[in-house]
Structure formats: structure tokens, C-alpha cells
Image (cartoon, rainbow, N blue to C red):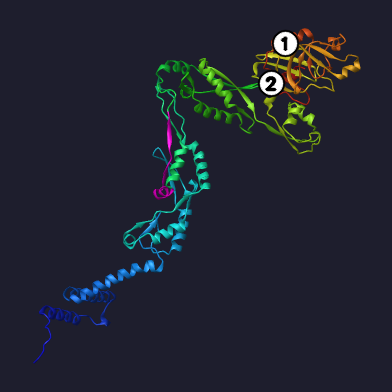
Amino acid sequence: MDIQGPRRSSKARERQQQRRQRRENIVQPSQRTENSVRSGWLNRAQLLWQDAMWYVRTQQWVWRVTVVAVVLAFVMTFLSYPMSGRIYPQVSSMGVAIGGMSTEEAEATLREAWADDIRINVMADGDLVESVPPQALGLTLDAAATAAAARQDVNWRDGMISATVKPVITLTDSGYLTVQDYLLNMTETINEAPFNAGFQWQGDALIGVPGRAGRLLDIAPTLAEIQDDPAAIVELGRFTVYVSPVPPDVSDPTPYVAAAREFTSQPFDMIGYDPFEDKEVRWSTSREVLTSWLEVSITGLTLREETYIEFMELQNQSLNPDEETRFLNPEETLRTMREAIESNSNQVQLRIRYFPQSYTVEAGDTASKIARKTGIPFYLIEQHNPGRDLNVLSVGDTLNMPTRDVTMPNTPVAEKRIVVNLEEQELWAYENDQLVFNWTISSGRSNAPTSPGIYQILNHDEVAYGSSFSLCDEGSCGQWEMYWFMGMYEVVPGLMNGFHGAVLLPNGAFLNGGDVGYPSTFGCVMSRDDAAQELFEWAEVGTVVEIISDEFEPQSDLAAQTLQSA
């Protein structure tokens, strides 16, 4: 009995015939071009693929083998990751891809990204303040623990699709101090003062501007937030600080519009006065700028300090075109301007002050000569150079000098000035640049000389007292009386030189017999008694005194004029 195998279907025979026909039609290799070679291989690959797919569809065993092979390949691939100690693919942390890496490689990659790439956007009220590295917030990454979690805690299903591993982030005690310092430094950026009601011009109409709230960085809850979940901050790449609103003192400017209009509608003069040079610097401003300086407080119309200070800082720059020596004191200028607003004044006078300087010792200098050259009493130079022996100076040494303002503690009277010429033993007194008095004086003798410099009247005493052991040689030990005394500078604390008239000695005689014209006092400037009384009654506290000599040249134009008339 003949046993016959299964016949191929007619379709199979047709496919074989078609394939044979296509092979017969293939061009010989010697005749192929580069393109035809590529085309031939593509055709063969396509035929092989079609055959394979036909076997898979028609032959059940082929299909089963294929499925088993794919599953085995898939399983072996994913089993290879945990077996080799590598992290599943499609795994990341902090946005850094670490899939397929060993834990050591992942740890190194995370460390590098932490140091170079990770940034945290610091937000306040929905606005970006700045972008900082996480270290600025005191955060520390445990890269080893994060890599270990990526390998151990991610299953094959998540690792095949996509998995994000939460980084292990800590805030140590030192990190807490770091973020605390960071937040304290941020207050200047975050904090905004409330805007009290103000005003502005629209054409020729002055209108009120309502007040608005400011804000303050609230450090305590912000620190609590970063302590609570530091890892979430890194994952989000965002950290929002807490702020508290600060309401304005006054929101409604309406009741003060009329007063503001009156103040800003008039011309306004700002006069800076330098009492040492006896010169003025004038600044003018527009009504719009003047209006920007106004605000409404709970006490009424007053000065908006932050806006005014910006203006004054620019004026300070104009005072020092070459070297920074002079300035306007902020506290003084603020107080003066507030007073002008309260009194509805259209002018303010601002005192120009001096910065402390240094002095470089020159050939022939001694400490006492330096005091006389600079117009700074010797004891004040000693105070500003503690621990130094001023009796031992070398050329090129540098001494710290106090500000010139130490000799003028009171508000200067700009309209009046007394000039004393030690070389000519003469006094001039001016008011509004006009000569009022001029007479001969007596200054200090050689062993108690009058100090040249620029001072001011400090006090008034109709009778003051003094004494000197040197008078004992003249048979007049004890205390003497000085009439019409006005102090102008301290020789040492508690001992003051000044102007006076006749000096009544303990023996009942008058010093010099009441005469003047040559150095004979113990440091004061003495006038005849009647002249001294006139000066006493004319010169109020704050009147500027300029004492010139061969060692101290005139600083003001008025003092320079006295040299020409001498």
C-alpha cells in the first residue's frame, strides 16, 4: 500500500512558481548597477519576510515557537537587569535618566547633575525671584541611597514603561543654618514697603494716588515648609516662600489733595551750605519730582523717605566730582525736609558735611604742627590714633584724621562769620557778607598759642573763670575772671578757648592793663571790653569763626579778603 504525504495546496505551488519566475528574471551580477544590487537584496528580504509570515500564519507550530522565543527573549532581557545589578530602563530621578546603569554609575551621574545642573526656582507671590542651586537652600543629596532605591524599589513593569524615583534629600543642622541665612539675605529682595497714599500731576491737575499694601518675607513658616519635604522641592524644581501683606498707613489721599497742591505749586529751593568754605550749592527740582516726595501718614502730609533719599544720593555724587570728601547726612536732610513740608516752606537749607580723611606726614611735621595745619585740635588727633606715639613720626606715615565737622557741632549760622588773623592780631565780623566789626585783638602767647582753624560759637557766659600757674611768677596766683566770654573750641576736654573782653586777675589788676594788639592771653582771643560786649551780643551760638595764620590759609572768600585789606 502506497503511503502518500500531504499535498501542498495549489496556492503553495503558485507561490513557488512565482518565486522561481522572479529568480529567472534576476539580472546577472556582472550587469547590475549599485542601485539594482540594493533593489535585489531588498526584494529577497521582502520574499523571506513574506515566507516567514506565511509560515507563522499557516503552521501552528511555527507560530508557537515564535511566541515562546519572543517571550523568552523579553524575560531574559529584563531578568538580566536585576541579575547584573543594573537599574531597569526608563528610570529617572530629578529628571536625570539613570536607566540601564549600575548603581555606581547612577550615583556618579546623580552627583554630577546635583552639582552642575539641578536648579530651584524660588517663587514669591507667584513671581520668580531667582533660580538657585539646591545647595543654596541647605539641601543635601544622598546619591547612593537614591541610586539604590532606583535598583531595588522599581519593578520590571514600571521600569519597562517609565518610573520616577524620589531622590533622598536631607536638611542637616548646618543646612538649616544655610537656608536661614539665605532667607535673611533675601529680605532685601522680597520685602516691599507699603505705599502710603500719594499724589501725581496730570496736566495741570493734581490727583490722589491710593495707597497699596507691601509685603514681608515670613521666615518661620518658610523654614518649616522646606523641613517638611525637601525632596518634593527638588522634584518640582520650585520653592515658594511665605510672605505676609503689610497694609499702608493711609490709603485715601483725598483729604490732603489741597495741601499737596499748595506745597508743590510754589517754586522750591534746596540750598546746601558748606560752613568751612562759606559757599552754597543750590539744587532745583520740578513740581513732579517734588510731588513724588509726598505721602500721607497717620499724622498728615509728610515726606516719602525712600523717594527723597534716591534724589539726595544723586546730589551727593555732584558734591564730589574728583574725590569723595563731602556729603549730605541722610538723617539731617530727612528731618529738614519733613519740617519744610509741615510748615509749608518753599526752601530748605542742608548742611554739607565732611568724611574723615587721612594725613600723610611731611618733612618737618610734628603732631602739634599737623594740628595747626589742619585746624583739628591735637587731642582729637590723638583720639583717632589710639596706641600711637605722636611724638615719633616719620615722613610718609599716615594718621587717621577725624571729620572736620568735629570743630563745628552746632548748626552753622550761615549769615554771620568772624575772621581772626593771628599774624595781624586783628578781628573782622561779617553779616550777609557785609563788614560789621573790625578791631585789634590779642591772641595766645607762644607757650599757650591760639589754634588756627574753623570753629563756631559754642556758648555765652557774661563772666567765665580761668587760671594758670605761670601767673604765679608775676605775683598773681589764683583764679581770674573773663568778661563776655564765648567758647569756640576745646583745647582738651573741659578746657575751652574762646572770645572775651577784659581779664580781672586775682591781684585786682587787668591782664595787659586791658590793652590788646599782641599775643598775651593763654589761648583765647581777647578784645577791649566794650568791643567784646558788642561781639557777645551780636554773635549767637553757631556763628562760624575762621582763625587764619601763616600755617592755616583762608578757606572762605571773606577770610581771603581780610588778607588783602591787612
Q: Quick check: can you spot residue 176?
A: yes
Q: Is residue 364 above or below residue 482?
A: below
Amino acid on which the number 1 mark rests in the picture: Phe
On the image, the x and y values in percent for residue 378 come to: 76, 28
Which mark lies nearer to you, 1 or 2? Answer: 1
How far from the left and from the top, in percent, is residue 511?
A: 85, 12
Between 488 and 274, the one nearer to me in the picture: 488
Quadrant location of residue 462?
top right
The quarter of the picture where residue 467 lies is top right
Q: Amino acid at mark 2?
A: Asp
Residue 49 visible in image: no
Q: Which residue is mark 2?
A: 557
Tell which residue pokes out farthest to the left in this image. 1
Relative to 87, 182 lies left or right = right
Instruction: List x then y, in percent, for residue 365.
Output: 79, 33
Q: Which residues are magenta?
A: 230-246
Q: Is residue 331 above or below residue 178?
A: above
Q: Quadrant of the N terminus?
A: bottom left
Mark 1 vs mark 2, CA separation in Å:
24 Å
State the count of labels. 2
Residue behind mark 1: 536
**Relative to residue 436, is residue 252 drawn left or right?**
left
